[in-house]
Image (cartoon, rainbow, N blue to C red):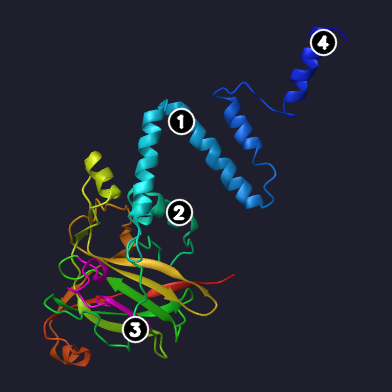
Amino acid sequence: MDEEEETEEADADDEEPGMTTDATGTSVTEQALAALRGTTDPRLRELLTGLVRHLHDFARETRLTQEEWEKAIAFLTATGQSCTDTRQEFILLSDVLGLSMLVETLGGHHTPGVTESTVLGPFHMTESPVRALGDGIDLVGGGEPCVVSGRVLSADGTPLPGAAVDVWQADDKGYYDVQQPGVQPAGNGRGLFTTDAEGRFWFRTCVPAPYPIPTDGPVGDLLRATGRHPYRPAHIHFIATAAEHTPVTTHIFVAGGDYLDSDAVFAVKRNLVQDFAMTDDPPLAREFGVPNPFRHARFDLVLERAS
């Protein structure tokens, strides 16, 4: 073997089998996708393959620069650093990009008559206190008195006794309890109720106000950079669960309020907009334990039977 042949053989031995040394805009994607082929979980492989493919296509389409990618990494890092036990900045980011609502819509209920779902939002961070039917969840007072009542039903109209109805809302100034520790008592605007033998629930509260999502973190910076307002229309959150039924996460929105056509998290659905009707009925007010007149929202939660 001559000297040239020995050198070529030595160089070949130094290379790892299958190693591609010519990284190009196309080959990097091919290599990254090939690296996922050994993923044993089929769904995980599908998700990661789609993610890598679309991320790489995005970078090519927009001609993403190194400086821009570094800024994106810094933004995502700051988003994670903003998360606490009572604040979830990544959910907020998903919300304002419309991703939360898209995922909810893709996986939501499509059976006619079943209550439509919408986003969980970033403030379901603490357990709601267990309350008796008819209890008040407005522990501060000062807002416009309101009663919310309804039933939890199966899709065929059968009442669901013993169903759990988890409720949380902002106060009449647009703040959740976790945003104002020391101002609002823990659990203000929250309650976990159990329906009666006829599937009914009811509770006292105040009419919630529209409010801005938190803008003192990276998501707020993003909204300002894109010229968007941070406001959500007035609403009350619900999660309803019952045995042998699929839970639903939803809101009711106050009819006639501001921002119904420009919700910062894109979560408004027409069927979830409810009339908080002014009610002048002294006997009913006494029954509910509220001053007369009062606002009254009636809303049934209809669940799909689990398959």
Q: Nearer the viewer, mark 3 or mark 1?
A: 1
Q: Helix or strand or loop: what does disc 1 sit on?
A: helix
In the image, which residues are magenta?
175-193
Of the 4 image quadrants, the one containing the N terminus is: top right
Question: What residue is drawn where x is 31% and y is 59%?
Answer: 270
Q: Tell me if 116 is positioned left or right of 26 in this view.
A: left
Magenta segment main secondary structure: loop
Q: CA distance from mark 4 to mark 1?
A: 43 Å
Q: CA distance from mark 4 to mark 2?
A: 59 Å
Of the 4 image quadrants, the one containing the C terminus is: bottom right
Tell me the residue that label 3 is attached to.
201
Lower position in the chain sequence, tag 4 or tag 1? 4
User: Where does residue 144 sit, x and y in percent of width and height?
Assistant: 13, 75
Q: Helix or strand or loop: what does disc 4 sit on?
A: helix
Q: Which mark is residue 103?
A: 2
Q: Which mark is residue 59?
A: 1
